[in-house]
């Protein structure tokens, strides 16, 4: 999805635009007599991110279901947003000094978005952000990624990230070409995901900010490199131990210590990532989930589907349909 500069004074048209660019929603003007409703939505899709500079002119309230994605609201000048997630969720207030980060799960309520509030509104694909986390860690993150709901954007990493995101989105919206060029787009998108993981608070933040833990020993690295190079190969524990030049038991112990799982579990994780990549890039009319799973070594459909859902939080068929 490319860029869009959208203007309207019609509430239904604004709701439909937010539905198309972000999420299904219910939108209502709180006090149309105080300030006239005049929506200005400048949005651009950048791979796993949707970045928008949004304002409504009048005070509004909105209601969503589960977002299914991480979302950041960062007011750019004046005004505030008051948000809740879940029926008993506490009110979170986004201001020019503090952004609010929303979780993929939980019904979401925007109780008041003041008419004087221009906001940087960023939707972040949850699976893409989790994948970036694992790429930076160099190992699977077994727990669900959860971001702290508040982010300082008055200074430090939070301010830097907001500034960077605005610059990238403005360039893409202006059509300068670089932000959407194939040689530049992916690195920019990864940089935005990396930056958010460094700016927001979560259980792995310190590890990302201060890398330099124990280096994986050569036998472990040899196996990891071999598996990443040929994930479709029918590896066995004995063959992996041969590649590592250690015993099966020693390789098992090293993997559990330095990777947090067994060698064969690592093989499965790499293959699941390959399946997901192919499903996300595939044509849903000409591609079969079973065919892709078989190609990457998953011969038991039921077990594969359960492993895929546990790993990515959705069925493989949903990934193929584009979520």
Image (spheres, rainbow, N blue to C red):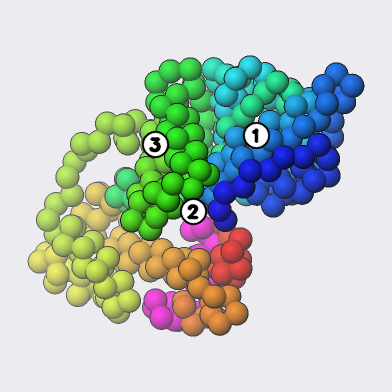
Q: Is residue 253 above or below residue 51?
A: below
Q: Is residue 223 magenta?
A: no
Residue 84 visible somewhere in the drawing:
no
Q: Which residues are magenta?
A: 294-312
Between label 1 and label 3, give the one nearer the viewer: 1
Few, some or many C-alpha atoms within 10 Å of disc 2 (few <14, some 14-19, many ≥20)?
A: some
- Labelled disc at residue 137: none
Q: Point out the tag, 3 or 2, that comes first from the N-terminus.
A: 2
Question: Marks 2/1: CA distance?
Answer: 19 Å
Q: Is residue 182 above or below residue 70?
A: below
Residue identified by numbered label 2 = 47
Q: Residue at x 83, y 26 (%)?
A: 36
Q: Point out the tag, 1 or 3, that comes first from the N-terminus.
A: 1
* Image coords of residue 171 (percent x, y): 46, 41
Residue identified by numbered label 1 = 54
* Image coords of residue 156 (percent x, y): 39, 21
- Labelled disc at residue 195: 3
């Amino acid at each position: 999805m490319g860029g869009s500069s959208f203007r309207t004074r019609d509430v239904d048209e604004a709701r439909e635009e937010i539905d198309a660019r972000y999420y299904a929603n219910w939108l209502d003007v709180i006090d149309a007599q105080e300030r006239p409703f005049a929506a200005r939505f400048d949005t651009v899709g950048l791979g796993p991110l949707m970045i928008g500079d949004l304002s409504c002119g009048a005070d509004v309230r909105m209601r969503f279901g589960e977002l299914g994605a991480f979302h950041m609201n960062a007011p750019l000048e004046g005004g505030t947003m008051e948000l809740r997630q879940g029926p008993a969720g506490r009110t979170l207030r986004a201001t020019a000094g503090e952004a609010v980060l929303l979780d993929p799960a939980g019904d979401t309520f925007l109780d008041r978005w003041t008419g004087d509030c221009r906001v940087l509104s960023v939707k972040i694909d949850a699976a893409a952000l989790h994948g970036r986390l694992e790429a930076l860690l160099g190992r699977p993150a077994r727990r669900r990624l959860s971001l702290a709901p508040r982010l300082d954007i008055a200074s430090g990493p939070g301010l830097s990230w907001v500034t960077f995101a605005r610059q990238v989105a403005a360039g893409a919206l202006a059509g300068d070409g670089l932000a959407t060029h194939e040689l530049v787009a992916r690195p920019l998108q990864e940089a935005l995901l990396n930056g958010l993981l460094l700016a927001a608070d979560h259980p792995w933040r310190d590890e990302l900010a201060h890398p330099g833990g124990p280096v994986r020993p050569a036998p472990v690295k040899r196996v990891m490199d071999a598996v990443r190079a040929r994930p479709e190969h029918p590896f066995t524990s004995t063959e992996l131990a041969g590649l590592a030049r250690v015993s099966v038991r020693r390789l098992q112990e090293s993997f559990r210590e330095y990777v947090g799982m067994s060698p064969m579990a690592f093989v499965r994780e790499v293959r699941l990532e390959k399946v997901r990549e192919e499903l996300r890039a595939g044509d849903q009319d000409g591609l079969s989930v079973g065919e892709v799973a078989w190609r990457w070594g998953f011969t038991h459909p039921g077990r594969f589907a359960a492993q895929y859902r546990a790993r990515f939080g959705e069925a493989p068929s949903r990934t193929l349909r584009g979520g």
